[in-house]
Amino acid sequence: MLARVIQSKTIHWLGRQLSNQDNPESWLDPVLARINPMWVQAYTPARVEQVIQETADTRTFVLRPARRWTGFRAGQHVNICTEIDGVRRNRTFSLSSSPLLWESQGLVTLTIKRLPGGLVTNWLHDQVEPGQVIGLGEAFGEFLIPEPAQPVLFITGGSGITPVVSQLETMAAQDYPAPVTLLYFVRTHRDVIAGEKLRALASRHSTLRVQVIATNESEEPRFFRGEDLDEIADLKSREVYLCGPKGLMDLAGELLHQRGVTDDRIHSTFFAPPAPAQLEGAGLGGQVTFAKSDVQVGSEGDANLLEIAEAAGLKPQYGCRMGICHQCSCRKTSGTVINRLTGQVSGAGEENVQLCISVPRGPVSVDV
Ligand code: FES
């Protein structure tokens, strides 16, 4: 009797999966995942080779992605995809290794800080061990080393150092011919990530200068100040890369502007997403039609399309949730949306939009 029930449930499940012809991965992947998780097609499987404790709350995960992964450039990010308590979760992290490690040994590293209340970061720290497989998306991002070589200043804080470690390793391997300075802010010296590697790079790469500044080591906090920049030769001719907590990035931007560094020389990455635009009074909200799902819901205020879809029980794909990775891009077939970051108003016709930063203004229809 039990065997008959199991058999009928299996046939029913297979029928449901096979009938989803639009997306072959959706029925094939669960089968492949059971046979060998490295065969899954929807993302690139990556086997965890090693877990290295960097600081009390930061670990480096050494991964071996399946060879079909297309690689990355220093400073780029990836989405990782994993299942926690039966729910698929995506999160964006920076690659902390140099592309050379991928090219020579087929390995990449992600250096990840445990965040208070962070579902995925806590899971990675508490549950992931060598031998497990996680999903990797394709690399993305424009936080890239300038070409041809130009003087560079990196200003990083906390785990914002991770893409910069990848860049510094790459520059050292290329004997990058221009001056490079790193200002790395940490709470205490115990919080320095990749300290040994940074020291080794600075001694190997003659144009690299590394300065670690601990902000909370003495009674009087030691904040980022203008003199830190005044000591840097040719500041105005440097390409400046910012990566760290928003407060540090805002302060860095202000101090740089005061010293005549123009916006076209300042590059920042997703640790400091642009502040949301002021959208009050812009007639926000409206009826949203998720056409593929045959769902219609009303929305109010500055809720974005991703939040509206999730509140309606839908599960569109997403990664960073801050307008960086384009994982949530989909077709808007009609209606007007406002970009939550820039305040820019879309046209009323058909176009691609990023669900996570698009706020409806009036009725909108999207292919979700
Ligand atoms: S989820 Fe990354 S851009 Fe929307």
Image (cartoon, rainbow, N blue to C red):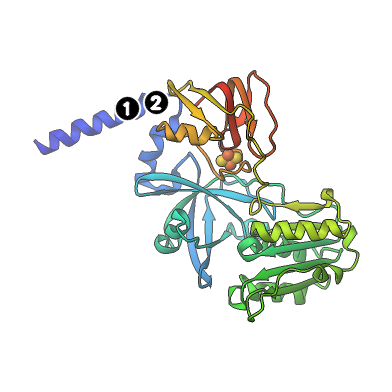
Q: Tell whether 39 sits left or right of 265.
A: left
* Residue at disc 2, secondary structure: loop
Q: Position of residue 341 (x, y in %)?
A: 66, 40
Can you tell which quarter of the image residue 97 is in?
A: bottom right
**Residue pointed to by mark 1:** 16
Query: What amino acid is labelled 1 in the image?
Result: Arg
Q: Tell whether 13 sits left or right of 92.
A: left
As drawn, which residue projects farthest toward the bottom?
218
Q: What's the residue at 70%, 69% (across, down)?
A: 184
Q: What's the residue at 61%, 63% (across, down)?
A: 159
Q: CA distance from mark 1 to mark 2?
A: 7 Å
Q: Tell whether 6 sits left or right of 202.
A: left
Q: What's the residue at 39%, 48% (across, down)?
A: 36
Q: Quadrant of ligand 1?
A: top right
Q: Nearer the viewer, residue 281 or 32?
A: 281
Can you tell which quarter of the image residue 128 is in?
A: bottom left
- Location of the N terminus by quadrant is top left
Vertical relation: 198 (above or below) 311: below
Vertical relation: 148 (above or below) 212: above
In the rendered image, is residue 315 in sight? no
Q: Are marks 1 and 2 in contact (CB under 8 Å)?
A: yes
> Pointer 1: residues within 10 angstroms few (<14), some, or many (20+)?
few
Q: Position of residue 55 (x, y in %)?
A: 54, 72
**Residue pointed to by mark 2:** 20
Vertical relation: 134 (above or below) 22: below
* Residue at disc 1, secondary structure: helix
Can you tell which quarter of the image residue 240 is in?
A: bottom right
Q: Position of residue 154 (x, y in %)?
A: 76, 62
Query: What amino acid is labelled 2 in the image?
Result: Asn
In the rendered image, is residue 293 in sight? yes
Q: Nearer the viewer, residue 92 or 30?
A: 92
Q: Position of residue 230 (x, y in %)?
A: 86, 69
